[in-house]
Amino acid sequence: ETGVTQSPTHLIKTRGQQVTLRCSSQSGHNTVSWYQQALGQGPQFIFQYYREEENGRGNFPPRFSGLQFPNYSSELNVNALELDDSALYLCASSTQGAAEYFGPGTRLTVT
Amino acid sequence: AQSVTQLDSQVPVFEEAPVELRCNYSSSVSVYLFWYVQYPNQGLQLLLKYLSGSTLVKGINGFEAEFNKSQTSFHLRKPSVHISDTAEYFCAVSVTYGNKLVFGAGTILRVKS
């Protein structure tokens, strides 16, 4: 059984650019959630996808968007990057009604 | 809306000593409760969860937590810590199991030899 994987591990972007982060869910999981963890803080819920449909969204602006694919992998897209978007982005997968299992994260730095 | 307060930002403790990491939550509805651990430069690992039933929950690595509804607390305990327990610990709640975890700010546990 493979765990949750994320790519890339690290990346550096310039303010105003766009970025795409990727997540492969754990085998058998049909639900993916994304969280943003700023330095020194707890993770904050961005949104969740269940069977390719958005299934809940946190308090993030529309420039944060996502996709879930038929194989349940997922992408997080962030447009018009701002300095405050610098954070660790965590992906978590689960089946409905089950605990979430987290990937190692992608460290995004916006300069 | 739900919120989580972790009362200590850092907890230093000597190896083989007991430890308690404190967590209080606020919610107008029933919640599910979780503790996660984050080792340096890694993602979050689920330690334990409370869904219903017995208020004392046992997790991995010898950790346990007790749900206290009247005090809206879910403190994490370990009777004897090891150097390898040095990490950041996050308490979290959710209203719907498997959706939208609300996390506290974290407690860094530093185990000293």
Image (cartoon, rainbow, N blue to C red):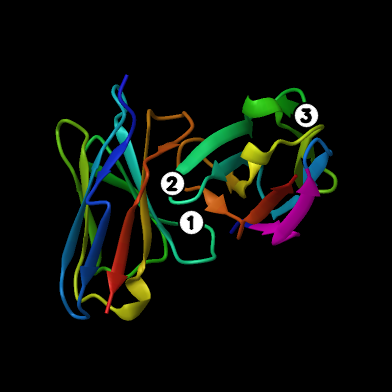
Look at mark 1 in the image and give the residue it sits on. A43
Graded by Cα atoms within 10 Å as few (under 14), some (14 to 19) or many (20 or more), the crowding at tag 2 reads some
Q: Nearer the viewer, residue B103 or B82?
A: B82
Residue corresponding to mark 3: B55
Mark 1 belongs to chain? A
Q: Contact (CB < 8 A) between labels 2 and 3? A: no
Count of numbered badges drawn on the protein: 3
Q: Amino acid at mark 3?
A: Thr
Image quarter where the C terminus of chain A lies is bottom left
Residue at (20% x, 78% y) in the render: A14
Compared with residue A86, is residue B56 higher up or lower down, i.e. above or below? above
Please report whichever mark, 2 or 3, sits nearer to the chain's N-terminal start: 2
User: Residue lying furthest front in this view?
Assistant: B113
Q: Nearer the viewer, residue B113 or A56?
A: B113
Crowd tier of the residue under label 1, counting other residues whose Cα lies within 10 Å: few below 14, some 14–19, many 20 or above: many
Identify the image quadrant of residue A46.
bottom left
Give the residue number, with chain letter if any, for mark 2.
Answer: B42
